[in-house]
């Protein structure tokens, strides 16, 4: 028994000295649990997405339209945008003609227009318009559901206003007022209550329709909802929801086009972090000593490995996109050269990260374990697994500092939004700048590291 305990203690001592194994065994799973938990609301007061930009243009003079805008502002999942910022940083109210260019420029992905005929005296029901860039299918479904829930919870008041407006058009103001007074008196005498208050509610359109349609608003029924009959079906019929997809209308296979890029860059990062560990295999095999004995500098060793990584990454990314094309119909050949340029920029940034790992770590195991931690964290934060909007706002800001986020933006710009080279330049510039900074750090660190032990 003592021998067994000694052997077990020896294994734990080896584990304690092996930092790479400790990171892979404990740090990586803990990070994944933490990020996924935040996404699904564990440990948060508010669950679900937060701060999704939603542009709202109110063209209606009905007071209930302002009430609806206020309800959207109160929804924590949305950050309502109602103003347009000019180049001199002055602002003005947002207009409908501003929405489509701003959606294409990724200022926001969803916009709601409350038209002037939101409540019409010539028809029963409400008229709403939604503009969107459904680049992420999960986010699109969540946003649509939240928007409909917020709208539908306020529709009974708006519907009552519509009924009053239509009755006024048919009967005239004087006869409608007489009718409302008589109805209020009858309700008060037969069911109780204050006739004056009932009359005020009738004039404002508050008929108690929220009770009638309560099951619809609570069950997710309505346009796109699951309620196909009863109150929910009636409710969906009286709300005219005009929808326009601003970006991505011509994409042949939207689902595949959305997801291929995120997973492609994640697997590339894994491949290049493992490639960085091969640096130490060459060192242990004595290859560095033989190369440095010839007219080769340390910088040339690192840059040759960088160029190899870029070429390898370009080949891997294009192979994965070609697989997406032949398996799922992703339009690769229609965007061939811009996709190749984006893949090269992504491969350069990923390879530079791998080179920095190789220069900053002391062993192949350390490079692999630290690389796994960085890749998993960046993939989760950057949007490869789930929409960035599902995370707390501080994590949404951190996402902008990951290679994965900008890679997905670049691939989405090419394959989804059909952007031109000029429109892609900001993303390409960020990826190229990231590669330059990381390689500068890697060369600086490698030139000062100990190659010979």
Image (spheres, grey):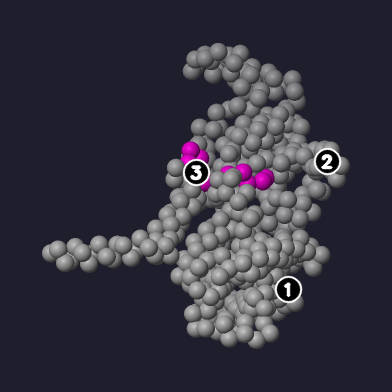
Residue 36: % across, % down: 47, 53
- Residue assigned mark 2: 89
In the rendered view of the protein, which quadrant contains the N terminus?
A: bottom left
Mark 2 lies on a secondary structure that is loop
Q: Earlier in the sequence, mark 2 or mark 3?
A: 3
Residue at 57% x, 49% y is 395
The residue segment tinted magenta is 44-54
* Front one among 255 and 377: 377
Residue lying at 61% horizontally and 54% vertically, measured from the top left: 399
Residue 434 covered by magenta stretch = no
Measuring from the top left, give residue 6's x and y in whole percent: 21, 64
Q: Is residue 318 left or right of residue 20?
A: right
Distance between mark 1 and mark 2 Cα atoms: 34 Å
Circle 3 residue: 47
Relative to residue 420, is residue 310 depicted above or below? below
Which residue has dot 1 on it?
341
Q: Nearer the viewer, mark 1 or mark 3?
A: 1
Whether 49 is among the magenta residues is yes
User: How far across and how far down the image is residue 19, in percent?
Assistant: 42, 62
Q: CA distance from mark 2 to mark 3?
A: 34 Å
């Amino acid at each position: 028994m003592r021998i067994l305990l000694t052997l077990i203690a020896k294994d734990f001592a080896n584990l304690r000295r092996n930092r790479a194994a400790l990171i892979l065994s404990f740090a990586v799973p803990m990070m994944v649990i933490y990020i996924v938990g935040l996404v699904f609301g564990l440990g948060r007061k508010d669950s679900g997405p937060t701060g999704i930009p939603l542009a709202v243009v109110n063209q209606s003079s009905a007071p209930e339209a302002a009430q609806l805008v206020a309800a959207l502002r109160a929804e924590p999942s949305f950050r309502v945008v109602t103003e347009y910022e000019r180049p001199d940083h002055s602002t003005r109210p947002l207009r409908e003609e501003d929405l489509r260019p701003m959606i294409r420029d990724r200022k926001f992905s969803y916009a709601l227009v409350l038209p002037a005929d939101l409540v019409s005296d010539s028809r029963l029901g409400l008229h709403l318009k939604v503009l969107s860039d459904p680049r992420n299918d999960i986010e699109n479904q969540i946003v649509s559901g939240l928007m409909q829930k917020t709208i539908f919870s306020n529709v009974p008041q708006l519907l009552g206003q519509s009924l009053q407006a239509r009755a006024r058009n048919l009967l005239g103001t004087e006869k409608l007022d007489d009718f409302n007074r008589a109805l209020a008196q009858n309700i008060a005498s037969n069911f109780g209550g204050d006739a004056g208050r009932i009359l005020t509610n009738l004039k404002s359109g508050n008929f108690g329709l929220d009770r009638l349609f309560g099951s619809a608003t609570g069950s997710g029924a309505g346009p796109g909802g699951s309620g196909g009959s009863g109150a929910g079906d009636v409710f969906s019929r009286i709300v005219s929801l005009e929808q326009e997809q601003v970006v991505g209308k011509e994409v042949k296979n939207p689902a595949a086009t959305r997801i291929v890029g995120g997973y492609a860059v994640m697997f590339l990062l894994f491949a290049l972090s493992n490639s960085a560990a091969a640096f130490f295999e060459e060192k242990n095999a004595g290859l560095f000593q033989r190369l440095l004995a010839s007219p080769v500098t340390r910088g040339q060793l690192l840059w040759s490995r960088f160029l190899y990584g870029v070429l390898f990454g370009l080949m891997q990314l294009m192979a994965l996109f070609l697989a997406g094309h032949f398996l799922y119909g992703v339009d690769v050949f229609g965007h061939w050269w811009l996709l190749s340029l984006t893949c090269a920029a992504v491969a350069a940034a990923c390879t530079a990260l791998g080179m920095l790992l190789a220069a900053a770590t002391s062993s192949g195991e350390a490079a692999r374990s630290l690389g796994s931690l960085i890749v998993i964290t960046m993939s989760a934060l950057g949007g490869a697994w789930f929409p960035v909007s599902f995370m707390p706002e501080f994590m949404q800001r951190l996402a902008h500092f990951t290679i994965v986020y900008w890679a997905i933006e670049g691939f989405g710009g090419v394959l989804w939004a059909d952007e031109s080279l000029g429109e892609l330049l900001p993303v390409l510039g960020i990826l190229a700048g990231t590669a330059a900074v990381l390689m500068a750090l890697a060369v600086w660190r490698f030139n000062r590291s100990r190659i010979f032990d």
